[in-house]
């Protein structure tokens, strides 16, 4: 017999935590959170910069502080079980989850399921940057994890491709850590990140910001040595005779996020192939009844405050679904 | 003199038009809340930034412990602050909110505080 749980939540980041607390408040008394990391908090733990919580808490918090607010609340609710280092590897349409935990292989059935699995970063391959494949190319979030969690500096002379918020935040972080940020290269006419981050992360440190430019080639054999940069027109076509080179040892890719939804796709949820998000009418809902998606796996949010508020609605929807089932 | 600023107080990023006379702010428009006004005055007269970074942990469950200044510090002190932060090590359990350096850089009322709790292993 497979053990059955009322509500299972996959992911213990801001979305999963808010969903769990809200489901509990709305009457669900058996809740299990599966988190693959050693800690709750998700990506917030590596976002050490301030700016979180202005809407939700009316305070300016760093990522770890924002996460802590929710972890504290969770710790006060013993009915919400948190299983760390628990990696879900399979999901069926009947909401049977298979997950690995060091030393064990587990299978449970959820009456209701909320997926709060967040996003992953787009890679160099997805934006087609030609050139060699040397060491020194990182996604911006990976570099953030290396510096803020592991205490490792991935490079000393950095070029950032794309101007997403993580890339801009990392531009400042590298400079503060003593590295040189040679340029931020953005193919669009303007920054893809928030204006405040352009000001406080790029302009504050006089980092050259090239809009309507792209990297035409990455050079280097074992390690990145330089990049070729070229201007593009409004149709993103290369403008002739505008190429120049920038010497660097590292490249950060900050070109956007993709919602991580392979598990629900495995279960048969209808997915939009372009956005990698569930196709269904209504916030957090999917084509499978009782299976909800919230936070950045539902759609890519700009700020965590809205993730928390919208994920609370997912907790509420799951509670309502479970109540209907009991009647 | 007129200057255009982008407010950094919240993600809205209001564009502020500031009239400056003798290095003092005379008039501000474009802000949708009072934070914008305060930001413009500070940005023109004494620009400040909140600083966050990490401190090395020794014998703790976290290798790097995030820290922050409890209030914005002068922009011109940022690199001096980073130099000081790099000298620090945390060897005992600390809680988020604990002060690790009081009157940081000799700035009155500015403390360097822990942003994530950690414990000895």
Image (cartoon, rainbow, N blue to C red):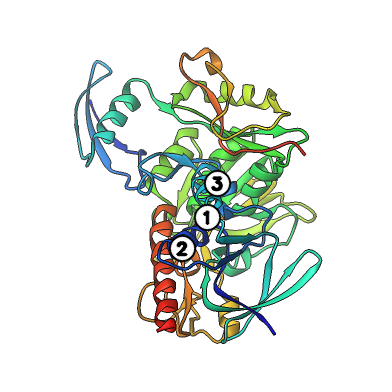
In the picture, measured across the screen, residue A294 lies left or right of residue B57, that is: left
Sequence-wise, the earlier of marks 1 and 2 is: 2
Quadrant in the picture for the N terminus of chain B: top left
Residue A235 showing in the rendered view: no
Disc 2 residue crowd, few under 14, some 14–19, many 20+, Cα 10 Å: some
Residue A321 showing in the rendered view: yes
In the picture, measured across the screen, residue A16 lies left or right of residue A82, that is: left
Tell which subunit mark 2 falls on. A
Above or below residue B121? Residue A295 is below
Residue A168 percent coordinates (x, y): 50, 46
Closer to the camera: disc 1 or disc 3?
1
Above or below residue B2? Residue A211 is below
Above or below residue A108? Residue B92 is above
Q: Nearer the viewer, residue B50 or A83?
A: A83
Residue B105 percent coordinates (x, y): 55, 16
Residue at 53% from the left image edge and 66% from the top image edge: A116
Tell which subunit mark 1 falls on. A
Quadrant in the picture for the C terminus of chain B: top right
Res A77 label? 1
Gap in angstroms between the C-alphas marked 1 and 3: 26 Å
At numbered mark 1, what does the secondary structure look like: helix, strand or loop? Answer: loop
Residue at 53% from the left image edge and 31% from the top image edge: B97
Residue A188 percent coordinates (x, y): 42, 59
Which residue lies under the disc numbered 2?
A: A24
Residue A128 found in image quarter:
bottom right
Q: How many marks?
A: 3
Q: Residue furthest front?
A: A327
Sequence-wise, the earlier of marks 2 and 3 is: 2
Tag 1 near tag 2, CB within 8 Å: yes
Residue at 50% from the left image edge and 66% from the top image edge: A29
Which residue lies under the disc numbered 3?
A: A47
């Amino acid at each position: 017999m497979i053990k059955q749980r009322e509500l299972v939540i996959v992911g213990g980041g801001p979305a999963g935590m808010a969903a769990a607390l809200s489901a509990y408040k709305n009457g669900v008394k058996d809740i299990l959170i599966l988190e693959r990391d050693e800690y709750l908090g998700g990506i917030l733990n590596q976002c050490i910069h301030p700016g979180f919580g202005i809407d939700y808490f009316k305070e300016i918090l760093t990522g770890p502080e924002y996460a802590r607010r929710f972890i504290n609340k969770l710790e006060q609710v013993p009915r919400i079980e948190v299983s760390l280092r628990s990696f879900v590897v399979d999901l069926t349409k009947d909401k049977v989850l298979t997950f690995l935990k060091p030393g064990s292989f587990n299978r449970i059935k959820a009456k209701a399921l909320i997926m709060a699995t967040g996003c992953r970063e787009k890679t160099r391959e997805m934006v087609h940057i030609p050139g060699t494949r040397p060491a020194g190319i990182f996604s911006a979030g990976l570099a953030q994890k290396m510096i803020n969690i592991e205490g490792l500096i991935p490079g000393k002379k950095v070029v950032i491709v794309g101007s997403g918020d993580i890339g801009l935040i990392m531009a400042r972080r590298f400079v503060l850590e003593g590295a040189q940020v040679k340029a931020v290269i953005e193919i669009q006419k303007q920054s893809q990140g928030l204006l405040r981050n352009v000001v406080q992360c790029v302009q504050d440190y006089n980092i050259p910001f090239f809009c309507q430019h792209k990297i035409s080639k990455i050079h280097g054999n074992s390690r990145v040595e330089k990049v070729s940069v070229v201007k593009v027109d409004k149709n993103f076509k290369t403008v002739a005779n505008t190429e120049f080179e920038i010497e660097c040892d590292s490249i950060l890719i900050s070109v956007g996020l993709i919602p991580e939804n392979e598990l629900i796709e495995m279960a048969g949820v209808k997915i939009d192939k372009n956005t990698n998000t569930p196709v269904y009418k209504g916030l957090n809902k999917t084509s499978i009844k009782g299976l909800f998606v919230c936070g950045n796996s539902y759609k890519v949010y700009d700020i965590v405050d809205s993730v928390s508020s919208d994920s609370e609605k997912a907790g509420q929807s799951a509670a309502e679904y479970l109540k209907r089932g009991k009647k | 003199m007129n200057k255009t600023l982008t407010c950094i107080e919240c993600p809205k990023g209001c564009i502020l038009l500031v009239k400056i006379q003798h290095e003092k702010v005379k008039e501000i428009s474009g802000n949708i809340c009072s934070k914008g006004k305060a930001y413009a005055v500070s940005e023109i007269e004494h620009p400040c930034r909140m600083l966050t970074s990490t401190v090395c942990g020794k014998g703790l469950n976290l290798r790097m412990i995030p820290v922050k200044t409890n209030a914005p510090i002068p922009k011109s002190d940022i690199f001096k602050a980073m130099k000081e932060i790099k000298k620090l090590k945390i060897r005992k359990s600390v809680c988020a909110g604990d002060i690790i350096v009081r009157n940081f850089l000799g700035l009155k009322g500015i403390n360097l505080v822990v942003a994530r709790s950690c414990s000895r292993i």
